[in-house]
Image (cartoon, rainbow, N blue to C red):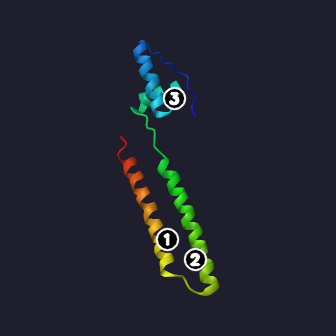
Amino acid sequence: MPERVHKVTVRLTDKEYTRLLAKMNEVGVGSMSLYIRKMMLDGYCVKLKTDDFGEIVYLLRMCSNNLNQYAKKANAFGEVYAADIENLKKRLDEIWGHTKSMMLAFSQIR
């Protein structure tokens, strides 16, 4: 990473400073230097809501566990039940739904 050698000084009123702190807090950035640099160079800071990530990970774990159980059943008995496959399809559709909603939210970031 290149060394930062140029210093820029900005003076703010109390109201502007309070607003700056509120905006930093809003996006969860703790470093004023990082926040100002990001805003100055890119024009925006984005805080992504990652609640859906946890749900997707949970659903993927459940699907993985189910798939392992189906494989064991298939190896032991030589068959897999259609209801088991439908259950797995339903869970995968749910994961895909969460993924699509996150991708849509990401695509709207400007």
Quarter of the figure with residue 98:
bottom left
Q: Give the residue at the far bottom of this rendering.
A: 78
Please state which of residues 35 and 24 is positioned toward the viewer in this rendering.
24
Asked if the residues shown at circle 2 and circle 1 are in contact, with their CB atoms under 8 angstroms apart, the answer is yes
Q: Which structural element holds mark 2?
A: helix
Q: Earlier in the sequence, mark 1 or mark 3?
A: 3
Q: Which structural element holds mark 1?
A: helix
- Residue type marked 3: Leu
Q: Residues within 10 Å of mark 2 (few under 14, many from 20)?
A: some
* Percent x, y of residue 70: 58, 76
| Residue drawn at the location 41% of the way across and 21% of the way down | 19
| Residue drawn at the location 42% of the way across and 29% of the way down | 39
Q: Which residue is mark 2?
A: 70
Q: Nearer the viewer, mark 1 or mark 3?
A: 1
* Percent x, y of residue 35: 48, 28
- Residue type marked 1: Leu
The image shows residue 103, relative to residue 26, as above or below, that is: below
Q: CA distance from mark 3 to mark 2?
A: 49 Å
If the image is split into quadrants, where does the C terminus sit?
Answer: top left
Q: Earlier in the sequence, mark 3 or mark 2?
A: 3
Q: Is residue 12 visible?
A: no
Q: Which structural element holds mark 3?
A: helix
Q: Which residue is mark 1?
A: 88
In the rendering, which numbered label is found on residue 34? 3
- Residue type marked 2: Tyr
Please state which of residues 71 and 34 is positioned toward the viewer in this rendering.
71
Q: Earlier in the sequence, mark 2 or mark 1?
A: 2
| Residue drawn at the location 46% of the way across and 61% of the way down | 95
Q: Is residue 15 visible?
A: yes
Q: CA distance from mark 2 to mark 1?
A: 10 Å
* Percent x, y of residue 73: 61, 80
